[in-house]
Amino acid sequence: MSKYVLPKHIAYTRGLADHINVNFSDSTAQALTYEQLCAFSLDDLNSMPLSYSPVQGDVLLRESIINFHQNLNCHRQTLKADNAVTFCGAQEALSAIYQSLLAAGDEIIVLTPSYPSLVAMAKSMGVVVKEIALSADNHWQVSIADFTRLMTEKTRLIVLNSPHNPTGSIIDSALADQLLALAKQQQCYLLSDDVSQASNYHDLALAHRYLDYSKSIVVGVMSKSLGLAGIRIGWAVTQDDSLLNSLLAIKAMSSICCSKVDEKLACIALQHSDKIITTNNAIIRNNIALFSAFINRYKQAFNWQPPQAGMLALVEVKNIDSIVAWSNALVKKTGILTLPSELFGLQGNYFRLGLGQNHFAQTLAIFEQYIDGQSIS
Ligand SMILES: Cc1ncc(COP(=O)(O)O)c(C=O)c1O
C-alpha cells in the first residue's frame, strides 16, 4: 500500500464535495478573470508558440520574480534571475525542496497549526517533525526561544510561514533577523514560505533578509496574495547552487517544465502586481471590517483574532461539542464550507476563515442567517 495519503484539508473537502457551494476557508485573494489580466498587457498571447518552456523557467518571469522579492524584502545581496526556479505551484516547489534537503532521521522545526503539507511531506519521509505549538492565549505569536529550545545537532531545516496559514500571525523583521542568526549559527537550512507576504495591508515590518544566507530558500506563488490560483506557477529562490541543481533535477524528472502559457500569464501578473495587490488588499481589509462587526454582534457564540496580515484567521466557535460535526452540519444546510482547525494540527473548536473573496459579504449574510436559525431552534 502507498505510504502517501491526501493532506487532511484536501481529503475533508473532497468528502463534502457534493454539498459545497462556497468556500468560507479559501486561502486565496480574489482572482482576476483571464480577460482582466490580459487587459494589463499589450503583448499578444495569440502569437506565442506553444513550445516547451526552459526547465528553470522563462527568464523574463524569473527576473520578475526576483524583482517582486527584492521589493518586499531587504537583502543586502543582489539576487539574479538564475537564483529562481519556477514550479507548478508553491506546493511542487516545497515538495522538491523537502526531497532535496531531507532524509529519514533528520529533524525539522515547524509551527503548529500549519499548512498541512509542511508536516505531512516530512512525516512521509521519516523526518522527525519538532512542532512549535501556537496558542490563541498568546495571540498565535512565536519567539526566538521557541525555536532555540527545539534545535539539536540533527536540525536540518527551519520551516517558516509568514503571514501564517491558518492563524494570520506574522514574523516581523526583528524576529526574522534573530531566526536568520540562529540558522547561520547552527548551519541549518531556513525555508520561508512567503506565499501571502504581499498581503500586508497594515504596512507591518514583514521584510526579511533571509536570502543573504546561502542556505535560505524563499517560496512564492501566484495563488495567494495575487489571487491567481488558476495560473499554476510558484517558485523557489535560493543562492545555494547545489540545492538549485537538485531542484532542477527533480523538476526535470516530474513536470520537466511549467506550462508556457502559465509562465507568460504569471509574468504579466508580476509586472502589474502593485495594482493587483492594492485591489486585493482593499478587499481583505473590507472583509476584516465586516467580520469584526459580525463578531461584535455574536460575541456569545464566536471569538477571533483578526489577521495581522494575509487573508486567513482562526475563528473560535463557542459552546459546541465538536467543530467537525458543526462544520459538517453547516455545509449540509447552507453549502458553506468551513475547514476545522484540526485539519491544520490544532485541537479545539476553531475553523479557518478566508477573507480574500469579493463574495465574502454574501456568504457572511447566509452564514448569519443560519446562525440565527440555530439559536432560535
Ligand atoms: C502556506 C502555504 N504554502 C504553500 C501553499 C501551496 O500553494 P499552491 O496551492 O498555490 O501551490 C499553500 C496553499 O494553500 C499555503 O497555504
Image (cartoon, rainbow, N blue to C red):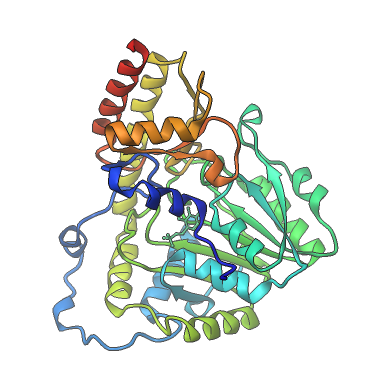
Residue at x-position 32% and y-position 78%: 259
Does the image show residue 314?
no
Q: Would you say 64 lies left or right of 160 here?
A: left
Residue farthest toward the top in the current orientation of the protein: 376
Seen from the viewer's position, the closer of residues 13 and 254 is 13
Q: Up-down: is 247 above or below 149?
A: below
Q: Would you say 304 lies left or right of 213 here?
A: left
Q: Position of residue 376 (x, y in %)?
A: 33, 11
* Quadrant of the rendered image containing residue 310: top left
Residue at x-position 20% and y-position 67%: 41
**Quadrant occupied by the C terminus:** top left
Q: Position of residue 325 (x, y in %)?
A: 46, 32
Residue at x-position 53% and y-position 45%: 343
Residue at x-position 65% and y-position 39%: 134
Seen from the viewer's position, the closer of residues 342 and 361 is 342
* Quadrant of the rendered image containing residue 311: top left
Does the image show residue 12?
yes
**Quadrant occupied by the N terminus:** bottom right
* Quadrant of the rendered image containing residue 358: top left
Q: Position of residue 113 (x, y in %)?
A: 60, 44
Residue farthest toward the right in the current orientation of the protein: 153
The tally of labels here is 0
Q: Position of residue 214 (x, y in %)?
A: 67, 72
Residue farthest toward the front in the current orientation of the protein: 1
